[in-house]
Amino acid sequence: MRAGLIQMTSSDVVSDNIEQACALCNEAVTHDAQILLTPEVTNCLSGSRAQQMDQLTMQDDDPTLAAMQDLAAKFGVWILIGSLALKTDDEDERFANRSFLINSTGGIAAWYDKIHMFDVEVSKTETYRESRGYKPGARAVVVNTPFGNIGMTICYDLRFPHLYRDLALAGADILTVPSAFSQATGPGHWETLLRARAIETGSFVLAPAQTGTHPTQTDRVRKTFGHSLAIDPWGTVLADGGTAKGVTVVDLDLTKVQETRKKLPSLSSAQAYCLAT
């Protein structure tokens, strides 16, 4: 299995991001990638509700989704759209942060709504309340592909290890973690957490990322960490995308999943216990 991790610097203008994503996907195809993976909020990275309302659409009308479906069908590749910010018909008008897995004929094989909302105070000057603008999902997703079973997650989900264990127990061989990780937490946490999820579950982890300073139509500046990573079931970093926009291509040997889980059967050897207080 050859994967192409797409590292982007998305703006808050959808049309610009479609152009960027398509160019990078085309580059990945020239390197014979069979599955392409884009980062979180591929279509629009914005902290402005007004800008989002102007730029975003419902799923059926989303131009980024349509463009990625066309690319998948054209080249006969699978594409994980890390996530799209989408309007919904919910009464509270919150958006969805939704990841899509597109098959090689352009069909939607699966979709997943981010479960854990990024409601944090990273510093006195950097605060996020994702739940104000986005409605959390409530279902975990594992989907069968020709490459193996893929467990879908998004960014802040990374800090909740039980989700990844459940995905692995449900059959996932590959865990996807498309992200727009903060520069404040990235240096200390990004690689460590991704390697931990791989080691704990004996799975491959593929984490395409947003990177750099993101152009916006507002005064709020957003910076992300980059370093798209591919990690094997032993916790070894196979590829690191650095901090520039671009494509990182990596070959995965899926036989390593069962080999590693046989050596370290932590998924099957967990014991029930009670907590003494």
Image (cartoon, rainbow, N blue to C red):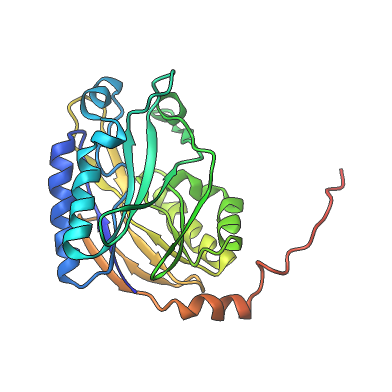
Residue drawn at the location 43% of the way across and 47% of the way down: 154
Q: Would residue 46 be found to the left or right of residue 147 on screen?
A: left
Residue located at (42% from left, 23% from top): 90
Q: Quadrant of residue 13?
A: top left
Q: Position of residue 131 (x, y in %)?
A: 46, 28
Percent position of residue 183, x then y: 35, 45
Q: Is residue 169 visible?
A: yes
Left or right: residue 23 compared with residue 202: left
| The N terminus sits in image quarter | bottom left
Residue drawn 60% across the image and 58% down it: 165
- Above or below: residue 166 compared with residue 16: below
Q: Residue at x 21, y 23 (%)?
A: 54
Q: Quadrant of the C terminus?
A: top right
Residue nearest the viewer, comparing 25 with 60 = 60
Q: In the picture provided, is 185 more to the left or to the right than 76?
A: right
* Vertical relation: 197 (above or below) 138: below
Front-lying residue, 106 or 247: 106
Front position in the image: 149 or 168 = 149
* Viewer can see residue 181: no
Q: Tell me residue 249's x, y (percent).
A: 26, 69
